[in-house]
Image (spheres, helix red, strand yellow):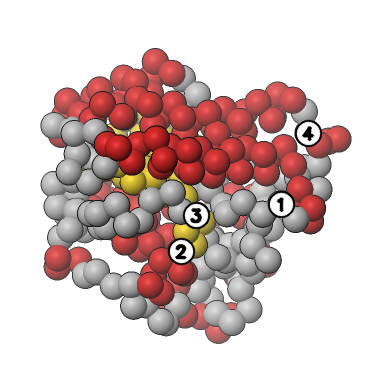
Amino acid sequence: MSTEKENKLQGKTIVITGASRGIGREIALRCAADGANIVIAAKSAEPHPKLPGTIHSVAKEVEEAGGSALALQLDVRDEAAVHAVMEQAAGHFGGIDAVINNAGAINLRPAEATPLKRFDLMHQINTRAVLLCSQAALPWLKKSEAGHIINLSPPLNLDKKWLKPYIPYTVTKYGMTLLTQGLAAEFEQYGIAVNSLWPRTTIATAAIEYEAGGPEIMKRSRKPAIMADAAYEILSTTDMSLTGQSLLDEDILGSRGVTDFASYAVEPELADKLFPDLYLD
């Protein structure tokens, strides 16, 4: 596995959506430890009554970790705002080297019980935002020596056990993965790698705590750090050997020499009793 001393991301500019907490925040801090420039793009400019973290608190943490930070409030549904954020990021740091499409919306209800308004929200924040953010950042990614787009979306699994229970959400996440494959093929000519990243086990985030499991599953989850380390390994790949793939955190880390994952467990004594994430058999 790469070490922080190598500083592979030194001076690289990485735009992370939904970076005010959870996996996005953890990726920001991991890359900041290498001296990267981090654009924290999220809605949370003010403290949330239940959830910790804002774009400003993460910006401070990024700088304390050794990176440079730019905190920009962003709703990824807003086309003009997304283009403005990319312009500001590139203007502030001199370019854009990577975009992490981490912002997400989740609602695990079947089709019959899902209001179209909620489906529209998930589609806009999950699928549509991948296309929008990728388009908006493209002029600068083309100029990067090793441009990257990472979408937090799962491998495509068409088993009906995954299609039946919450197909509205599933459609939007699979749409992200289809975009990964299509954008990878389209952007290969520009030397831009596009990959999906998904956790093998549930990750202890607000989505798990409040939408997809609760305290018991939180105990049998891994910390967001495993996703951050996996994202770091992807971003550190400077050739086009890694593109158009649906990568699992554990697999990418394993391919880089990591064999012990127990330290990532929320409760180490439950490290062998973790919940697999959605869409993984």
Query: Marks 2 and 4: CB-CB under 8 Å?
Result: no
* Label 1, residues with CA under 10 Å away: few <14, some 14-19, many ≥20: few
Give the mark, 4 or 3, whose residue is nearer the N terminus.
4
Q: Name the residue type under label 1.
A: Leu
Q: CA distance from mark 4 to mark 3?
A: 27 Å
Q: Position of residue 233 (x, y in %)?
A: 31, 61
Task: Kindly report the distance in space between the C-alpha atoms of the residues bearing marks 1 and 4.
Answer: 20 Å
Is label 4 or label 3 in front?
3
Closer to us: mark 1 or mark 4? Answer: 1
In percent of width and height, residue 279 lies at 66, 57
Residue position marked by numbered label 1 in the rendering:
158
Q: Looking at the picture, does residue 73 appear above or below residue 239? A: above
Could you tell me which secondary element the residue under label 3 belongs to?
strand
Label 2 or label 4, whichever comes before in sequence order: 4
Question: Helix or strand or loop: what does disc 2 sit on?
Answer: helix
- Of the numbered discs 1 and 2, the one sitting upstream in the chain is 1
Q: Secondary structure at mark 4?
A: loop
